[in-house]
Every structure is written in structure tokens, then in C-alpha cells.
Amino acid sequence: MSTRSSINSPRNSLLLPSVLVILVGVTSALTYQSIIKPPPPKLCGSPGGPPITAPRIKLRDGRYLAYKEHGVPREKALRKVIFIHGSDCCRHDAVYATRLSPGLIEELGMYLVSFDRPGYGESDPDPNRTPKSLALDVEELADQLNLGAKFYVIGYSMGGQATWGCLKYIPHRLAGATLVAPVVNYWWKNLPLNVSTQGYSLQPKRDQWAVRVAHYAPWLMYWWNTQKWFPGSSVANRDGTSFSQQDKEIVLKLGASRKPHLAEVRPQGLHETINRDMIVGFGSWEFDPIELEDPFLNDHQGSVHMWQGDDDMLVPVIPQRYIAEKLPWLHYHEVPGSGHFFHYNEGVVDDIVKTLFKTETEN
Ligand SMILES: *[C@@H]1O[C@H](CO)[C@@H](O)[C@H](O)[C@H]1NC(C)=O
């Protein structure tokens, strides 16, 4: 009652201050919006946007997906693989083809197609991206390239979200699957609190915060990773100071040859690449790996592998051990003394690929 009477009372002297307050409020809201709201992605092939140089397929929702083929021609291939890259990488970073020992590709009769995940390189962004939509993108790529009823998938790091998605949504299409240091979502509901907390605290502080923002305040992600007041995500800022010892040595040794196409990774901007990865990777999932079933339960015609370094500062080992323990059908390979980039070490990609192609009885 008292509020109502004060509103109704004629107090014209307050009118000017109120208008000022509203003006200031609206102005700061607009400024704030332009800081926290990501700029629209620069679509490839749009006026002023980056050029289209790669072959692309058109997906179910009109988006284009850029890809790159490696190895023996697909008509002659005995084994067809789809490679799903990690954060801040693109279709060129297909180490499971490009770093194999000479002759191995022919010996294995292997064809590998890598693609720019949505928003990366020359693939259109997908603001509605989920682990499921990524799995469906993989399936559509396979079908448009006529890879046949079954194909292998290898997913690295943030590409793990799509690989777990493939195991969940398109298991019947898989000939086998390998996850290499796949992203862990600390909010997967079947991860015990002590396991996710220990894993979470292994990360550098800046990444702990960035992961929290991705989960609880995805609308703040763009600002978080672009502001200069405090450190945002280490991946978004390309900061390697908290890499493990072995990772630092690998980065030093390989230099720019580790990612020769770095300039082609984010031509469309930060938000639909790194930030979207984090928002999807650490968001709320409708399933988690621990509830997955063995995709080869009935026919034993394939196998699923996880490779993980025990000194990885980006994707911690503790939750992976727990997942591996809960999924008896998952072949778990822990690599001692290794960080996140161990697949650049001599012979590692050969091992990973050969292991994937072994039949279930040999594993
Ligand atoms: C989490 O807690 C359970 C039950 O107390 C224990 O058995 C397990 O070893 C703990 N895991 C870790 C990684 O600390």
C-alpha cells in the first residue's frame, strides 16, 4: 500500500534523476552486451569472409562440412576411418594418417577422412551443436562419401565429445572406435564426486575457472576468453605454460611443424570454435559414457579403445581410470610419463592405429 501511494504521489523533482538512471542503465547494458556478446562468425564464402578451398558436403540442416581425404583411394580401401580433431585444430591435423610410418597406410589398406568440426576451418558453425549432432555429422559424412555400412572413428581430445556421441547414437555404424585423451565432463552424472573433483583440481586454475564458466554461465564464455583482466582458458589463449614436461618437450621439438596449418584453424572466429567446444564439452549431456553399452556385444566384430597419458594437464587421468574400470569392454591403454600430445612421439600413432584394426579375439 505504501509503495503504491508513493508511486502515485506527484514528486516531479524525482523525474529527471529517474530518467538519468534509466539512460545510464540502458547505455551500460548496451556496452555490456557488445562486450559479452560474440561477434557473428565470418562464414566461409560470404562477402568479406574467408575463402572456400576444401571439398565440402551439405548437411541435413543446410550447413556445409569441409573434409580432407588421406591414404589409399576409398574405392580400394580395406579400412575406412573418420578422424575427429581436437580443440584448436582442423582437418589438416590428421596425425593418424600424416604421421604414420612410411608404407603403413598401404600395408593396412587404410583410407582416412578428416573434417573441420563445425565452426573450425571451412565448416559452417553449428550454434546448436551437441554430442548427438556431431555424431550425426559424422554419419552423414560417411554416407555422402559412400564409406559403406561400417567405418572406424578416431577422436582426439575435444573430438572425444563426438566420439562418445558416435558410441551412443550410431554404434551400429562403427567398425571400431578409439578415443585418445578424450575430454572429460566433470558434470557427467555417473562420475562420483571424489573422482570428478580430483580430476578437476589437477587442471591449472585458469582452466578450472574457464570450465566452470562453460558449464554454469555459457553466455559469459566469449567475454571470459577475450578479456585481459585475468587469464581465460589456456587453449583459447594458446598458453602452454602449464603443459606437462613431456608436452613442453614435444612442443619445443616440433615447433610450428606440430600444427603447420594453425592459421586455418579459426578464420571464422573464436566463439564457434574453442568456446563452443567448451560449452558443449562441459555442458549438460543427455547421457554419459559410463552408461554406454558395448557396441560389439553381439557380433564381437570390433573393439573400442581409450589411450590416455598419466601426466596430462588438460584432460586428467583420474576420471578416465574410473570410466575404464566401469566399462569392461573398453580397452584402456594408459601411457606412463605422457601428457596430452603423446601421439606425436615416435611410433605412437602406428600403435594406436594397428591396435584399433586388430580383431576382438586378438585384443
Ligand atoms: C572415491 O571414493 C571411493 C569410496 O570412498 C573410494 O573407494 C575411491 O578410491 C575414491 N576414488 C578416488 C579417485 O579417490
Image (cartoon, grey):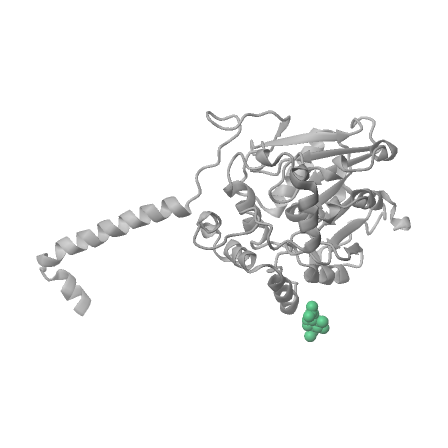
313 is higher (above) or lower (below) than 165: below
> Quick check: can you spot residue 127?
no
Residue 298 in view: yes
Q: Percent position (x, y) of residue 288?
A: 66, 56
Residue 312 vertical position relative to residue 301 in the rendered view, above or below: below
Residue lying at 70% horizontally and 49% vertically, measured from the top left: 249
The image quarter containing residue 192 is: bottom right
Q: Is residue 53 left or right of residue 326?
A: left
| Extreme-right residue of the structure | 362
Q: Quadrant of the N terminus?
A: bottom left
How far across and down, in percent of the image, does residue 36 sit? 41, 48
Lateral position of residue 304 relative to residue 229, left or right: right
Q: Position of residue 103 (x, y in %)?
A: 85, 32
Picture quarter with ligand 1: bottom right
Residue 248 in picture, x, y percent from top left: 67, 50
Q: Nearer the viewer, residue 336 or 58?
A: 336
In front: 302, or 20? 20
Q: Residue at x 83, y 27 (%)?
A: 76
Task: Judge by depth and name the residue closer to the eye, 246 or 278.
Answer: 246
Quarter of the figure with residue 53: top right
Which residue is rendered at x = 67% and y = 45% of the image?
252
Q: How many marks?
A: 0
Which residue corresponds to the image point at 35% horizontal and 49% vertical from the top-left?
A: 32
